[in-house]
Amino acid sequence: MLVPGIASLLALADQRLPSGGHVHSGGIEQAITEGLVTEVAGLERFLERRLRTTGLVTAGLAAAATVLSASPQAPAHLAQLDAEADARTPSPAQRIASRAQGRGLLRTAKAAWAAPSTTLSWTDLGARPHHPVVLGCACAAGGVSAQGAALAAAYLSVSAPSTAAQRLLALDPVSVAAVTVRLGPAIEQIAAAALLSWGSPDSGQPESHPGTNRTKTAEAGHNIPAHTPPGPPIGATPPQQLDLTKADPAAVSTGPDQGAADVLDLALLPDDSDPLLDLLAERHAAREERLFAS
């Protein structure tokens, strides 16, 4: 029997979804201009670095949005989460890009679902919410769990720039697709790490994982994994696997998580920004000629 919400999850992770994502390169256009990415191997290193930073942050935000959308105080909670997204996005150019994509996804979500939940309407999110916030709410509307929302956000953090790189460098589409497939285990690990950061009771994770770096948060009563450092330099040889957590994400999509909002501390969400990606975003925004909006 298929897990509920799987079809919605696949649709939300599809690059062809009319949310405006196709006009954003995730920093890869500027990286190519700077000579940091010139071929498939360089692209893979760039994507891994972006996954470990931007992907982890957006996965945490999307998962939190899925949980908070069902809370009795959903509008206030989502407004706070949107502010947390701002705080975790140092680059003004990246904040603008995230809100532009959020607005596009919001239009699609409004057409597909009446509301994220009985306690939250689409208008409660405002006109230009951050993309991962809308993504999480759309997942809730489609019956996708926090696990699924985190997985979709992590996947989108690499799929958008990989598609853009293929167009900009005229790369072999088969080779680019193979890169995304190879990053699959890392994408799943990032999604799991995003959930574990705030100790989701419905994350399907064990309480402890030997060999991982963890800190104890007494207020929440959960084991919180220390945030992973930014990825290696783009020119460096990437590790074979991101050893972020030994946990294997269980139940990718089991419906919105109930009761988890009571233990969700937004301060514990990942905040791993990457100065290089921020700099690339600002340089790209200052350009007069460019093919992508970001």
Image (spheres, rainbow, N blue to C red):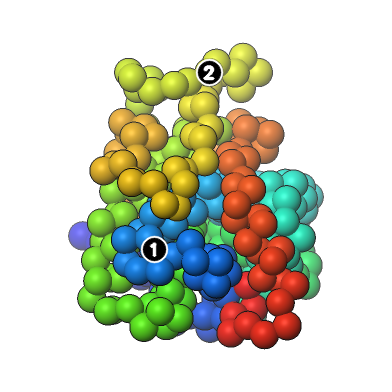
Q: Determine contact: label 2, label 1, CB under 8 Å.
A: no
* SS at badge 1: helix
Q: Which residue is mark 2?
A: 215
Q: Is residue 56 above or below residue 2?
A: above
Please state if 227 lies on the left or on the right of 251 as rendered.
right
Residue 14 in picture, x, y percent from top left? 41, 74
Amino acid tagged 1:
Leu
Is the N terminus in the top left, top right, bottom left or bottom right quadrant? bottom left
Label for residue 43?
1
| Crowding at mark 2 (Cα within 10 Å: few <14, some 14-19, many 20+) | few
Q: Where on the picture, by quarter, is residue 294?
A: bottom right
Q: Label 2: state its secondary structure.
A: strand
Q: Position of residue 48 (x, y in %)?
A: 40, 52
Q: Height in image: 214 above or below 289?
A: above
The residue depicted at 42 percent of the width and 58 percent of the height is 47
Amino acid of disc 2: Thr
- Neighbor class of circle 1 (other Cα within 10 Å; few <14, some 14-19, many 20+) is many
